[in-house]
Amino acid sequence: MGKNVLLVDDSSTMRKIVGRSLRQAGLDFDNIFEAADGIEALDVLEKESIDIVLSDINMPNMDGISFLREKSTREGIKDIPVFMISTETGDDIIGEAKSLGAIGAIKKPFTPEKVNEVLGPLM
Amino acid sequence: MNVGQAIIDGTQEVFTTMLMVELVSGDPIEGKGGDVEANITSMLGLGKDIRGMLAVHCPANVAKDITGTFLGMEVEELDEDVKDAIGEIANMVAGNLKVSFKENGQDIELAIPTTVVGDSFRTGGMPGATRVAVPFTMNGSTFLIELKYMVAT
């Protein structure tokens, strides 16, 4: 049985590209859900059965770091794994994301091969 | 640090990786000049050690070409998809520049891109800033990546 994936990015273009990369990588998933910021992502996590979250960091309304912080306080969703996909790759911000529960990060721009290499073991 | 080369390398990596397109770059222009007739511009603010703005200026045909290649579909007009796609190009180029400046010991904070569409507009501001612009050619048409910046003291 495949996974349900949540893509969180304020760019609809990037959500489409990440979704396409998942398909091109041949990863095993059932459904792709989308959210444009951390607030929408929390809402989806509360309503749907999500197995893994792929999230941007720089977003309006609620950024990826604030999303991780808020998610970590919610009992029913705090253990859902989150992987960051972002232009932000500095040790400080990725370190903060990991301290809040993120399990890894991919830098934009990325190839489908990179998505497969990093996310394959998780799917 | 060679800022013009950093713009070329950062932009070419975005297009090679995400669009599978090999861009041809022109020579970097320092100071005035090199402007293109843009119908869409996406700008992204920079803060912390390097303050300023990165902008992607595109004629309509280039913006539609980039978006169509990005999304794998025909694009007819400068719609929300085009604004979003050009904004994401600005975001990723700025992210690569952030890495280059970091290697030079300078940290940059990135804002969220803002995109403007129209037939007659100019961008300005930041008197005293250093301007470096690089023209790129994609499928025979030219667009411009422009960096205006000041080093924070």
Image: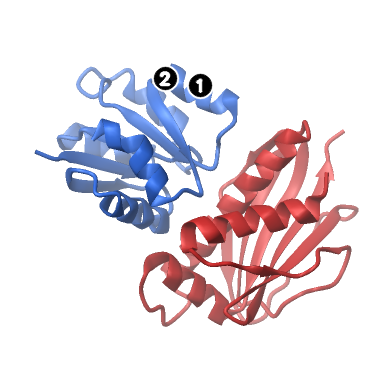
Chain colours: A blue, B red
Report crowding for label 1: few under 14, some 14 to 19, many 20 or more residues within 10 A (C-alpha): some
Label 1 residue SS: helix
* B137 left or right, relative to A118: right
Residue A78, percent from left and from top = 27, 21
Q: Quadrant of the rendered structure where residue B117 is?
A: bottom right
Determine whether B26 is above or below A41 in the image: below
Q: Quadrant of residue B148?
A: bottom right
Task: Please give the label number shown on residue A96.
Answer: 1
Q: Residue furthest left?
A: A1
From what the image shows, is residue A93 above or below residue A113? Answer: above
* Residue depicted at 32% across the width and 17% down the height: A73
Label ID, residue A100:
2
Q: Chain of mark 1?
A: A
Looking at the image, can residue B55 be seen? yes
Which x, y percent locates residue A64? 44, 34
- Where residue A99 appears, x then y in whole percent? 45, 17
Residue situated in front as seen by the camera: A70 or A97: A97
The amino acid pointed to by label 1 is Glu
Instruction: Using the image, name the chain to which the residue with label 2 belongs.
Output: A
